Image (spheres, rainbow, N blue to C red):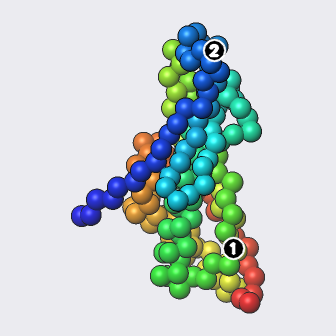
C-alpha cells in the first residue's frame, strides 16, 4: 500500500481590522492555495452569512466527490470497452444543522448525464458506476451514502 501526501494552504482573509474581537467583527473568507495552481477564494455557507459568490467547504466537498467519481467512471468505462463521449454532473447533497450549530452531510446524489458511443450498453455503464465506490478516494473517505442516478444519451463517434 502506498501513502500519498496532499498539501494546501488555507489563509484567512476576513480580518476587517479588529480580528475576532466579536462575532460580527470579521468575515468568513479565506483563500485556498496549492503550489503552482490558481488560488481559490472561499467563504462560509451563505446560510451562515457567507458570500454566495464564493465557494464554500460544502461546495468543494460535493464537487470533489463528483469529480472523483467521474474520473473513475471514465477509467473503468475505458477498461470495459465503453466509449464515453461526454460527461456532465449536477450533484446534490443534503445536510442538516443541529440546534447547537453542528452540521453534517446526510447524503449525496450524483446525477451524471453521460454521452455514450452508439451501440454502448447502458446496463454495462451502470455496472461500472457500481464499482466506483470501491476505488474512488473521496467516496471511500466520506461517511454518508452516495446515490448515483445516471442518465445516458448516445452519439456516433467522431
Q: In the depicted view, which residue is nearer to us: 73 or 39?
A: 39
Q: Residue at x 57, y 82 (%)?
A: 82
| Disc 1 element | strand
Q: Residue at x 56, y 24 (%)?
A: 97
Image quadrant where residue 54 sits: top right
Residue sitting farthest toward the front: 17
Front residue of 97/109: it is: 97
Marks 2,1: beta carbons within 8 A: no
The residues bearing labels 2 and 1 have C-alpha atoms spaced at a distance of 46 Å
The residue where tag 2 is placed is: 25
Looking at the rendered image, the disc whose residue lies closer to the viewer, 2 or 1, is 2
The x, y position of residue 14, in whole percent, is: 61, 27
Indicate the secondary structure of the residue bearing disc 2. helix
Residue drawn at (53%, 67%) of the image: 71
Residue 131 vs residue 135, the one in the foreground: 135
Q: With respect to residue 141, does 20 lie above or below?
A: above
Q: Residue furthest bottom?
A: 158
Residue 86 has which mark?
1
Residue 75 visible in the shown view: yes
Place of residue 105 in the rendered image (x, y in percent of width and height, measured from the top left): 53, 36
Residue 95 visible in image: no
Q: Quadrant of the N terminus?
A: bottom left
Q: Image quadrant for the C terminus?
A: bottom right
Amino acid at each position: 500500500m502506498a501513502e500519498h501526501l496532499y498539501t494546501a494552504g488555507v489563509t484567512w482573509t476576513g480580518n476587517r481590522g479588529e480580528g475576532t474581537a466579536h462575532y460580527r467583527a470579521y468575515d468568513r473568507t479565506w483563500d485556498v492555495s496549492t503550489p503552482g495552481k490558481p488560488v481559490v477564494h472561499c467563504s462560509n455557507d451563505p446560510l451562515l452569512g457567507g458570500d454566495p459568490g464564493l465557494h464554500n467547504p460544502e461546495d468543494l466537498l460535493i464537487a470533489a466527490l463528483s469529480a472523483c467519481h467521474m474520473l473513475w467512471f471514465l477509467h473503468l468505462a475505458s477498461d470495459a470497452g465503453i466509449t464515453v463521449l461526454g460527461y456532465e454532473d449536477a450533484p446534490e447533497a443534503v445536510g442538516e444543522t443541529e440546534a447547537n450549530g453542528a452540521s453534517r452531510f446526510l447524503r449525496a446524489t450524483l446525477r451524471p448525464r453521460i454521452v455514450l458511443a452508439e451501440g454502448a450498453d447502458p446496463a454495462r455503464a451502470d455496472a461500472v458506476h457500481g464499482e466506483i465506490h470501491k476505488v474512488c478516494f473521496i467516496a471511500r473517505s466520506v461517511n454518508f451514502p452516495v446515490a448515483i442516478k445516471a442518465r445516458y444519451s448516445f452519439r456516433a463517434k467522431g
